[in-house]
Amino acid sequence: MERLPGVLLSAAAQAAPPRQFPAVTDLFRQSFPAEEVILLEEGVVKLIRLEDDGRQLIVGLHSAGSMLGAAPVVANRSHPATATTVTPCTVRHIPAFAFRQLLKSDPATSWQVHEMLSREVCEQAARLSELACCSSRQRLESALQALLPSGCTPAKEVKLQTPLKHREIAELIAVTPEQLSRLLKGMEEDGLLRREKGWLILRDVRMWGSAEEAASR
Protein backbone atom coordinates (compact mmCIF):
# COMPACT_ATOMS: atom_id res chain seq x y z
CA MET A 1 0.00 0.00 0.00
CA GLU A 2 1.35 3.43 -0.94
CA ARG A 3 1.69 5.94 1.86
CA LEU A 4 -0.35 9.10 1.29
CA PRO A 5 1.27 12.41 2.30
CA GLY A 6 0.09 13.43 5.77
CA VAL A 7 -0.73 16.98 4.65
CA LEU A 8 -3.11 15.59 2.03
CA LEU A 9 -4.85 13.47 4.63
CA SER A 10 -5.17 16.50 6.91
CA ALA A 11 -6.59 18.59 4.07
CA ALA A 12 -9.09 15.86 3.24
CA ALA A 13 -10.09 15.53 6.91
CA GLN A 14 -10.77 19.27 7.06
CA ALA A 15 -12.81 19.19 3.86
CA ALA A 16 -15.18 16.37 4.81
CA PRO A 17 -15.39 13.13 6.82
CA PRO A 18 -14.51 9.86 5.07
CA ARG A 19 -17.25 8.31 2.98
CA GLN A 20 -18.08 4.66 2.37
CA PHE A 21 -19.23 3.39 -1.01
CA PRO A 22 -20.47 -0.09 -1.96
CA ALA A 23 -18.97 -2.05 -4.83
CA VAL A 24 -19.90 -1.00 -8.38
CA THR A 25 -20.18 2.72 -7.59
CA ASP A 26 -18.77 5.40 -9.89
CA LEU A 27 -16.56 7.83 -7.97
CA PHE A 28 -16.08 10.01 -11.05
CA ARG A 29 -16.90 9.59 -14.73
CA GLN A 30 -15.01 9.87 -17.97
CA SER A 31 -15.31 13.27 -19.73
CA PHE A 32 -16.77 14.96 -16.63
CA PRO A 33 -14.92 17.94 -15.09
CA ALA A 34 -12.34 17.01 -12.43
CA GLU A 35 -13.69 18.81 -9.37
CA GLU A 36 -11.92 16.91 -6.58
CA VAL A 37 -9.07 14.55 -5.73
CA ILE A 38 -9.95 11.24 -4.11
CA LEU A 39 -7.78 9.55 -1.50
CA LEU A 40 -8.50 5.82 -1.31
CA GLU A 41 -8.23 4.60 2.30
CA GLU A 42 -9.79 1.14 1.91
CA GLY A 43 -10.86 -1.04 -1.00
CA VAL A 44 -10.07 -1.47 -4.69
CA VAL A 45 -11.02 0.86 -7.57
CA LYS A 46 -10.72 0.26 -11.31
CA LEU A 47 -10.29 2.94 -13.97
CA ILE A 48 -12.25 2.22 -17.16
CA ARG A 49 -11.71 3.93 -20.51
CA LEU A 50 -14.66 3.80 -22.93
CA GLU A 51 -13.97 4.42 -26.62
CA ASP A 52 -16.35 5.83 -29.23
CA ASP A 53 -16.93 2.39 -30.78
CA GLY A 54 -18.26 1.06 -27.47
CA ARG A 55 -15.19 -0.92 -26.49
CA GLN A 56 -13.90 -0.47 -22.98
CA LEU A 57 -10.64 -1.32 -21.25
CA ILE A 58 -9.55 -1.34 -17.63
CA VAL A 59 -6.62 1.08 -17.74
CA GLY A 60 -5.76 0.95 -14.05
CA LEU A 61 -6.40 -0.87 -10.81
CA HIS A 62 -5.86 0.98 -7.52
CA SER A 63 -5.83 -0.19 -3.90
CA ALA A 64 -5.67 1.53 -0.50
CA GLY A 65 -3.15 4.37 -0.41
CA SER A 66 -3.90 5.53 -3.95
CA MET A 67 -4.67 9.07 -5.06
CA LEU A 68 -7.27 9.32 -7.83
CA GLY A 69 -8.07 12.22 -10.12
CA ALA A 70 -5.01 14.33 -9.26
CA ALA A 71 -3.61 14.61 -12.80
CA PRO A 72 -6.76 16.08 -14.42
CA VAL A 73 -7.22 18.40 -11.43
CA VAL A 74 -3.67 19.76 -11.82
CA ALA A 75 -4.06 20.03 -15.60
CA ASN A 76 -7.59 21.48 -15.24
CA ARG A 77 -8.96 18.89 -17.66
CA SER A 78 -11.85 16.44 -17.64
CA HIS A 79 -11.42 12.89 -16.37
CA PRO A 80 -9.91 10.57 -19.03
CA ALA A 81 -11.52 7.49 -17.45
CA THR A 82 -14.28 6.41 -15.08
CA ALA A 83 -13.36 5.33 -11.54
CA THR A 84 -15.58 2.48 -10.30
CA THR A 85 -15.34 0.67 -6.98
CA VAL A 86 -14.56 -3.04 -7.28
CA THR A 87 -15.02 -3.70 -3.55
CA PRO A 88 -16.61 -1.61 -0.78
CA CYS A 89 -14.38 1.46 -0.40
CA THR A 90 -13.63 4.21 2.10
CA VAL A 91 -12.48 7.45 0.50
CA ARG A 92 -11.71 11.06 1.36
CA HIS A 93 -12.20 14.02 -0.95
CA ILE A 94 -10.17 17.19 -1.48
CA PRO A 95 -11.82 19.93 -3.58
CA ALA A 96 -9.83 20.82 -6.70
CA PHE A 97 -9.18 24.43 -5.65
CA ALA A 98 -7.91 23.32 -2.22
CA PHE A 99 -5.64 20.70 -3.79
CA ARG A 100 -4.11 23.18 -6.25
CA GLN A 101 -3.58 25.73 -3.48
CA LEU A 102 -1.88 23.10 -1.32
CA LEU A 103 0.55 22.22 -4.12
CA LYS A 104 1.40 25.89 -4.63
CA SER A 105 1.93 26.65 -0.93
CA ASP A 106 3.63 23.48 0.36
CA PRO A 107 6.76 22.45 -1.61
CA ALA A 108 7.27 19.20 0.33
CA THR A 109 3.74 17.98 -0.35
CA SER A 110 3.99 19.15 -3.97
CA TRP A 111 7.14 17.04 -4.39
CA GLN A 112 5.46 13.96 -2.86
CA VAL A 113 2.49 14.35 -5.20
CA HIS A 114 4.83 14.73 -8.18
CA GLU A 115 6.58 11.51 -7.14
CA MET A 116 3.26 9.64 -6.96
CA LEU A 117 2.15 10.95 -10.36
CA SER A 118 5.54 10.14 -11.89
CA ARG A 119 5.34 6.54 -10.66
CA GLU A 120 1.87 6.31 -12.17
CA VAL A 121 3.17 7.57 -15.55
CA CYS A 122 5.95 4.96 -15.48
CA GLU A 123 3.46 2.19 -14.64
CA GLN A 124 1.15 3.29 -17.46
CA ALA A 125 4.04 3.28 -19.95
CA ALA A 126 4.97 -0.25 -18.88
CA ARG A 127 1.33 -1.34 -19.23
CA LEU A 128 1.08 0.13 -22.75
CA SER A 129 4.23 -1.74 -23.74
CA GLU A 130 2.84 -4.93 -22.22
CA LEU A 131 -0.43 -4.62 -24.17
CA ALA A 132 1.43 -3.99 -27.42
CA CYS A 133 4.32 -6.44 -27.14
CA CYS A 134 3.46 -9.28 -24.73
CA SER A 135 1.36 -12.35 -25.44
CA SER A 136 -2.04 -12.70 -23.79
CA ARG A 137 -0.59 -15.47 -21.60
CA GLN A 138 2.20 -13.17 -20.42
CA ARG A 139 -0.31 -10.40 -19.70
CA LEU A 140 -2.42 -12.78 -17.63
CA GLU A 141 0.57 -13.95 -15.61
CA SER A 142 1.60 -10.34 -15.00
CA ALA A 143 -1.93 -9.36 -13.94
CA LEU A 144 -2.22 -12.26 -11.49
CA GLN A 145 1.16 -11.40 -9.97
CA ALA A 146 0.08 -7.76 -9.60
CA LEU A 147 -3.04 -8.90 -7.72
CA LEU A 148 -0.97 -10.68 -5.07
CA PRO A 149 -1.10 -8.94 -1.66
CA SER A 150 1.59 -6.30 -1.13
CA GLY A 151 4.71 -7.80 0.42
CA CYS A 152 3.66 -11.35 -0.50
CA THR A 153 6.69 -13.61 -0.93
CA PRO A 154 6.15 -16.06 -3.80
CA ALA A 155 6.16 -19.52 -2.24
CA LYS A 156 5.59 -22.95 -3.74
CA GLU A 157 1.87 -22.18 -3.64
CA VAL A 158 0.07 -18.86 -3.14
CA LYS A 159 -3.68 -18.54 -2.57
CA LEU A 160 -5.29 -15.62 -4.39
CA GLN A 161 -8.89 -14.50 -4.12
CA THR A 162 -9.08 -11.79 -6.74
CA PRO A 163 -11.65 -9.00 -6.27
CA LEU A 164 -12.14 -8.93 -10.04
CA LYS A 165 -14.81 -10.91 -11.85
CA HIS A 166 -13.89 -13.14 -14.79
CA ARG A 167 -15.03 -10.49 -17.28
CA GLU A 168 -13.01 -7.78 -15.50
CA ILE A 169 -9.80 -9.82 -15.62
CA ALA A 170 -10.42 -10.29 -19.35
CA GLU A 171 -10.83 -6.52 -19.77
CA LEU A 172 -7.66 -5.90 -17.76
CA ILE A 173 -5.53 -7.97 -20.16
CA ALA A 174 -7.49 -6.99 -23.30
CA VAL A 175 -8.94 -10.39 -24.23
CA THR A 176 -12.46 -11.81 -24.42
CA PRO A 177 -13.88 -13.83 -21.49
CA GLU A 178 -13.71 -16.92 -23.72
CA GLN A 179 -10.02 -16.33 -24.43
CA LEU A 180 -9.38 -15.87 -20.71
CA SER A 181 -11.01 -19.24 -20.00
CA ARG A 182 -8.66 -20.89 -22.49
CA LEU A 183 -5.63 -19.12 -20.98
CA LEU A 184 -6.54 -20.25 -17.46
CA LYS A 185 -7.07 -23.80 -18.71
CA GLY A 186 -3.64 -23.70 -20.35
CA MET A 187 -2.02 -22.57 -17.11
CA GLU A 188 -3.82 -25.36 -15.27
CA GLU A 189 -2.55 -27.91 -17.79
CA ASP A 190 0.98 -26.55 -17.29
CA GLY A 191 0.60 -27.03 -13.53
CA LEU A 192 0.91 -23.31 -12.77
CA LEU A 193 -2.47 -22.84 -11.11
CA ARG A 194 -5.63 -24.56 -10.04
CA ARG A 195 -9.08 -23.30 -9.12
CA GLU A 196 -10.54 -24.28 -5.78
CA LYS A 197 -13.78 -22.96 -4.19
CA GLY A 198 -13.41 -19.42 -5.54
CA TRP A 199 -9.66 -19.30 -4.94
CA LEU A 200 -6.85 -19.34 -7.47
CA ILE A 201 -3.95 -21.44 -6.21
CA LEU A 202 -0.84 -20.13 -7.96
CA ARG A 203 2.13 -22.50 -8.15
CA ASP A 204 5.83 -21.78 -8.76
CA VAL A 205 5.22 -18.07 -9.46
CA ARG A 206 8.97 -17.47 -9.81
CA MET A 207 9.01 -19.89 -12.76
CA TRP A 208 6.14 -18.27 -14.67
CA GLY A 209 7.03 -17.54 -18.26
CA SER A 210 9.28 -20.57 -18.63
CA ALA A 211 6.39 -22.93 -19.40
CA GLU A 212 5.13 -20.75 -22.25
CA GLU A 213 8.67 -20.28 -23.58
CA ALA A 214 9.24 -24.03 -23.55
CA ALA A 215 5.96 -24.65 -25.38
CA SER A 216 6.88 -22.13 -28.09
CA ARG A 217 10.24 -23.78 -28.85
Image: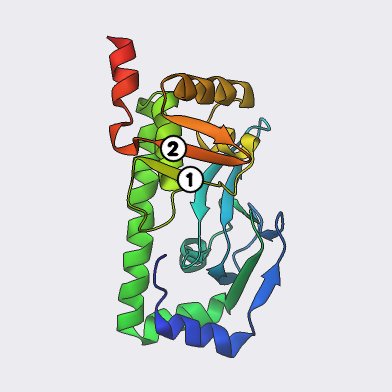
* Quarter of the rendering containing residue 202: top left
Q: Nearer the viewer, residue 71 or 125?
A: 125
* Residue 53 x %, y %: 66, 30
Image position of 113 with respect to 71: above or below = below
From the image, tell me which residue sits under label 2.
202
Q: Quadrant of the N terminus?
A: bottom left
Query: Residue at position x 60%, y 45% from top?
Result: 164
Q: Three-letter amino acid code at disc 1?
A: Lys
* Residue extending farthest bottom: 14
Does residue 177 appear left or right of residue 149 in this picture? right
Q: Quadrant of the C terminus?
A: top left
* Residue 6 x %, y %: 41, 83
Marks 1 and 2 sit apart, C-alpha to C-alpha, by 6 Å
* Quarter of the rendering containing residue 14: bottom right
Per the image, label 1 sits on a secondary structure element best described as strand
From the image, tell me which residue sits under label 1.
159
Does residue 181 appear left or right of residue 145 in this picture? right
Query: Residue at position x 50%, y 60% from top?
Result: 63
Q: Three-letter amino acid code at disc 2?
A: Leu
Image position of 139 with respect to 161: above or below = above
- Circle 1/circle 2 CB separation < 8 Å: yes
Q: Nearer the viewer, residue 73 or 155?
A: 155
The earlier-in-sequence mark between 1 and 2 is: 1
Query: Residue at position x 41%, y 20% from top?
Result: 190
Per the image, label 2 sits on a secondary structure element best described as strand
